[in-house]
Image (cartoon, helix red, strand yellow):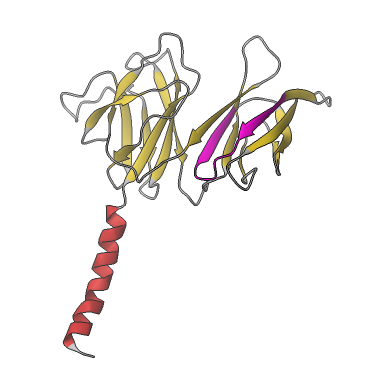
Amino acid sequence: MKLFDIIFCLCLVPAAALAQEARPRTCRILFLEPAPNAPETLQLFDGRVSREVELPRMNFSCVYELPAGALKLYLLPTAPADPRKIPPAAPVVTVPEALLDIYLLVSSDPSNAVAPVRMQVINAGEDKVKRGQMLWFNLTPSAVGGTLGTASLAIAPGARAVLDAPATRGEEYPVALSFRMPGDKQLYPLCETRWRHDPRGRSLVFIIPEVGRRSPRVMAFSDYREAPATKP
């Protein structure tokens, strides 16, 4: 083997490693069912950098990039003057090093005096939910099931489920869902409508309790990214 060939082969591994490191680590934020007086923005502190982030009500935030490695993410009312002195009660979540893409699910927590929210990390990696698929969360005590286009859904109370693409291309498809309350064998209609499928993106769907009603509420959020994530 010629010297040039040996050098070229030796360079392949570092180049591949650099390409992997160059892949951005992404985060999108969703504020599910905020209180009327909930903040619209907060500071997201990753242990090194603090930035103002949106807390959108009916859609995902823009895509934010995060540093590599294991992280603790804090939500704060203002950027910390001293990164070593974060209030102990500040909302915080841990992000394992292996998670490269995450959704940050935010909900109201009026009892927190630092920032009236709490957070939950959802793995948004392509190995968990692919383009065209739907990731469902049932946050109610009722079982929910039915059909969405060519796919069938059966999700237990408090469970999550990945649903395959309900259609083969960008088109409308029929949705017919029912629910069963705890201790009741009767099926009750939940929704009968039509949704639109986008095979280029994926969706998060939440089944949540509706105050003052026995039937749950279904909220769907589409995550379509036209280009690789960039810093906002």
Q: Is residue 126 above or below residue 104?
A: below
Residue at 25%, 66% (x, y): give it: 15
Magenta span contains residue 46: no
- In front: 195, or 119? 195
- State the quadrant of the C terminus: top left
Q: Is residue 189 left or right of residue 12?
A: right
Q: Is residue 174 left or right of residue 11?
A: right
Q: Position of residue 102 (x, y in %)?
A: 41, 40
- State the quadrant of the N terminus: bottom left
- Magenta residues (range): 191-206
Q: Is residue 182 visible?
A: no
Q: Is residue 47 visible?
A: yes
Numbered-mark total = 0
Looking at the rendering, which quadrant does residue 72 occupy? top left
Q: Is residue 66 above or below residue 60?
A: below
Magenta span contains residue 197: yes
